[in-house]
């Protein structure tokens, strides 16, 4: 007797979703807005500072705990999967339901991820942030170093996007009334993927432990219904749960630091009219000698 085939988003074509997005009225507008935002608020913003066309202070946000996570170049493919990570589920929805459902959720996700880039850029325009990443230029790292000047660390867009993805699709599966067994399997896959990608920002030294709580705090303000404090605590407690590269003692310290910083930002944010104010205070304080 054949084993049942478990539902997965891993086998769906990113290219097919991209092409359908470009040739659909419902999605082309959100896509163009998202593309313009990425070019303006990620690429142009960083390079304008790199080439001294714009003056924004650049702060190093390294933390001693970063040294407890070993540089692991072999994990770069996980790190670079973060875009495909949120696109593949759209292919699943198209196959599971129909093209109209895929287009609707594509448009909705693009609108949200566009806001994430814009909101993060409000922090970057106040202070840019960097870390000490190794001078390692082999393979895919050459592409990373070429296209990423490494000035947009706090908050981490990598973490923002993967958290947005797994919480967005969890809500989508509920709205579409997927059977519990199917939804649970897909949700587990996406949460596990988000955890893995989040861990890799430390393994390949693209971010500091300070960048993760900043991203979680940002998501708690951008999508507060989905990214609640309870959800954040659950997410943090799963970080490095299966790691054999970071000691148990250091995993505990990393989680405690991320949780403490998130709680501080979240509680401060409850009393501020602008959600980025706690991050601005943190960056000003961190910049002090």
Image: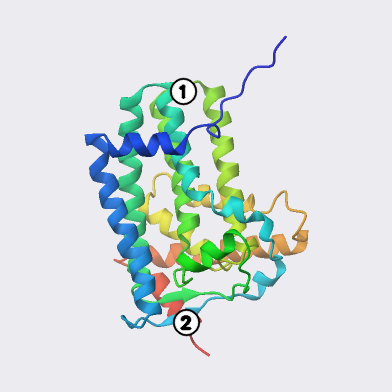
- Please tell me which residue lies in front, 211 or 9: 9
Residue that label 2 marks: 285
Image quarter hosting the N terminus: top right
When the figure is inspected, residue 134 is found, relative to residue 219, above or below; the finding is below
Q: Which residue shows up at 57% across the image and 68% down it? A: 208
When the figure is inspected, residue 226 is found, relative to residue 115, above or below; the finding is above
Q: Which residue shows up at 31% across the image and 40% down it? A: 108
When the figure is inspected, residue 151 is found, relative to residue 92, above or below; the finding is below
Disc 1 crowd rating (10 Å Cα; few below 14, some 14-19, many 20+) is few
Is residue 218 rendered to the left or right of residue 263?
Answer: left
At which x and y percent is residue 268?
42, 68
Q: Gap between marks 2 and 1, in whole Å?
A: 47 Å
- Please tell me which residue lies in front, 143 or 180: 143
Image quadrant in which you'd find residue 115: bottom left
Furthest toward the top, the residue is 1
Give the number of the mark in front: 2 or 1: 1
Q: Please, what secondary structure does the residue beneath circle 2 have? A: helix
Is residue 149 rendered to the left or right of residue 189?
Answer: left
Q: Which residue shows up at 34% across the image and 25% down it? A: 99
Image quadrant in which you'd find residue 54: bottom left
Q: Please, what secondary structure does the residue beneath circle 1 have? A: loop
Residue that label 1 marks: 178
Residue 147 shows in this picture: yes
Q: Which disc is residue 237 wearing?
A: none
At which x and y percent is residue 137?
61, 68
């Amino acid at each position: 007797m054949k084993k049942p085939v478990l539902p997965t988003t891993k086998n769906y074509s990113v290219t097919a979703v991209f092409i359908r997005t470009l040739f659909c009225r419902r999605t082309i507008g959100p896509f163009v807005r998202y593309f313009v935002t990425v070019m303006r608020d990620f690429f142009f913003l960083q390079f304008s500072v790199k080439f001294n066309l714009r003056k924004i202070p650049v702060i190093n946000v390294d933390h001693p705990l970063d040294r407890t996570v070993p540089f692991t170049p072999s994990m770069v493919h996980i790190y670079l999967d973060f875009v495909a990570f949120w696109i593949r589920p759209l292919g699943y929805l198209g196959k599971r339901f129909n093209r109209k459902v895929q287009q609707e959720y594509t448009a909705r996700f693009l609108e949200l991820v566009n806001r994430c880039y814009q909101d993060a850029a409000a922090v970057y325009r106040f202070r840019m942030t960097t870390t000490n990443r190794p001078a390692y230029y082999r393979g895919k790292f050459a592409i990373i170093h070429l296209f990423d000047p490494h000035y947009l660390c706090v908050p981490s867009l990598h973490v923002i996007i993967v958290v947005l993805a797994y919480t967005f699709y969890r809500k989508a599966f509920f709205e579409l009334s997927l059977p519990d067994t199917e939804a649970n399997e897909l949700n587990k896959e996406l949460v596990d993927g988000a955890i893995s990608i989040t861990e890799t920002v430390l393994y390949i030294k693209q971010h500091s432990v300070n960048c993760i709580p900043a991203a979680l705090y940002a998501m708690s303000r951008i999508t507060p219904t989905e990214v609640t404090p309870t959800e954040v605590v659950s997410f943090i407690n799963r970080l490095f749960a299966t790691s054999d590269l970071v000691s148990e003692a250091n995993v505990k310290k990393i989680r405690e630091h991320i949780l403490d910083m998130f709680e501080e930002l979240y509680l401060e944010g409850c009393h501020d009219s602008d959600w980025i104010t706690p991050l601005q205070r943190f960056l000003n304080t961190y910049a002090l000698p």
